Amino acid sequence: MSVETPSPDDVLENRAPSVGRMFLDRVAQTPQHEAYRYPEGDGWASMTWRQVGDRVRMLAAGLVALGVEPEQRVAIASTTRIEWILADLAIMCSGAATTTVYPSTMGEDVAFILADSDSRVIFAEDDEQIAKLKRHRDELPEQATVVTFDGTPVGEWVISLDQLAELGEKLMQDQPDVVEQRVDAIGRDSLATLIYTSGTTGRPKGVRIAHDSWTYEGAAVEAQRHLSADDVQFLWLPMAHSFGKVLLSVQLQIGFMTAVDGRIDKIIDNLAVVKPTFMGAAPRIFEKAHARIVTMQQAEGGAKEKIFNWAMDVGKEHSRRRLAGEPMPRSLALKHKVADRLVFSKIRERFGGRVRFFVSGAAALNRDVAEWFHAAGILILEGYGLTETTAGSSLNRPEHYKFGTVGPPFPGTEFRIADDGEILIRGPGVMQGYHNLDDATRESLDEDGWFHTGDIGEIDSDGFVRVTDRKKDLFKTSGGKYVAPSLIESRFKALCPYAGQFLVHGAERNFCTAIVTLDPDAMQQWAEQNDMAGRSYEELVSSPGAREMVEGYVKQLNDGLNRWETIKKFVILDHDLTVEGGEMTPSLKVKRKAVEDKFRDQLDSLYA
């Protein structure tokens, strides 16, 4: 299969000079079209582009009234919600730069980020976020003002979003063109965003992203012609992460409606209501959905489980022939039609029934999981990028995709594989550098503009990129054999529907071991199937039956591995890994070193 790709020149010429200009142009082009939908009470409220434009102008003018200067930093510490987006757009239209802060960030790290970025205004979601600021107020930049979404205003230091809008409305009475003037003054190289890396190792680094990079991302996606103004996006991703933020740029460029709700526990309910045509997500969401569906069918047992398994076998063979371009036997086509009516249509309905494709990013998606969904008629397009490359650098396309790869590069972006296998990226999406860290910038960004990603990979003859592991995660056993842990870990999670996390360990050891966690929701279903209903999670995961279950899946895993990669021993933790426990980043990546350090005694005991 092939597709005509727009030339890089077309993409580069088809973008606005700034995010602020891209937003104002969108408002002018489609003022009456629905822009956002968001939860309100027991239902959903809606805003047109004109309504969003009016609100953002007042908030942007309010920031100017507070004394915010061009490229000065304004922070947002909040979960994903409509106010986050309005605040970010206001910052863009005031000429300032957004500093993103995960709401789960500890107070001392929040203070570090705000001080390092020199953020002069801080949007804080609620009293919990305000309390963090209050405890570390002495460490914050001088004259910092807090604007809260739901929190309690405190004199002149903490004001409400409405109070900020009132300041803006008053300023615009005297200077009606103040926002347009600020937007017109923004250059392509002006700083738009400081995104602090979520810190799988060490202290977070502020990644400096220019307006030009965000507008390039929007234009590059539009140029591939896979989305239109008629699409509907459901957005739940953390907006402090580049994956979530880049989807806003794509929306501004194309103009489709976005439903916004960052509550992870509401994703499935929201999909049924919103009925999106596409959604971005981290692989963990697809792993959990796959595990949930499989374990539910196992719990049903009997004829329903047999029908489900038969349908999946049919779907996988149908999918394999489609991908290989082989002719479809009439008997298989008829079986697939029955399987679709009995099983696959019901799976798709769980996701709203209208999804054309999902986009998976932020971490590696297991190929088996992608193929399972494809067998059910759900396409997951895996992409690749980093905070340092403004999220999107490559992506599979709906009409041309290869499972196990992250697709070809975006138009205008170049990939190269270094002699040691490291992936290098060059293009408009690459960051300006790390904030206040010149040495770190020089280590990652060479003189020719190539960003050294730290990932190992390869490029096939069709230009599709395959990421095999993180360079820093590769380890060598005491026998001198290299092991790529992430590939083994994702394979186990695809095999075992009860898995929470699986972390492979073995650097300088004589064999590999693993830390295993089990998913709390999936284990409740396992308990019902194994006459252990009503037992606590700790009782379940420490039971002989659970260990025997995990051993069975580890054996399946080992059957497909090289001898030196096989997992000889493992430990099951009494809890799943969490962001709050410091074991995962807010973007749901495991903090490998932190986990190994935290459970060093358990790991050492496996080698005793």
Image (cartoon, helix red, strand yellow):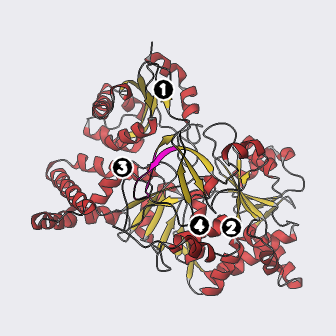
Look at 41% across and 38% down and name the residue there. 489
Disc 3 crowd, CA 10 A, few/some/many (<14, 14-19, 20+): some
Q: What is the x, y in percent for residue 581?
A: 58, 37
Lower sequence index among marks 1 and 2: 2
Q: Earlier in the sequence, mark 2 or mark 4?
A: 2
Q: Position of residue 15 (x, y in %)?
A: 63, 75
Marks 3/1: CA distance? 25 Å
Residue 8, quarter of the rendered image: bottom right
Is residue 112 shown left or right of residue 584? right
| Label 4 sits on residue | 217
* Residue for badge 3: 367
Q: Earlier in the sequence, mark 3 or mark 1?
A: 3
Numbered disc in front, either 1 or 4: 1
- Decide whether residue 466 is among the magenta residues: yes
Quarter of the image that includes the N terminus: bottom left
Residue located at (53% from left, 67% from top): 411
| Front one among 89 and 242 | 242
**Magenta-colored span:** 456-467
Secondary structure of the residue carrying numbered label 1: strand
Left-right relation of 346 to 444: left
Element carrying mark 2 = helix
**x 75%, y 67%: residue:** 91
Residue 573 appears in view: no
Q: Earlier in the sequence, mark 1 or mark 4?
A: 4
Q: CA distance from mark 2 to mark 4?
A: 9 Å
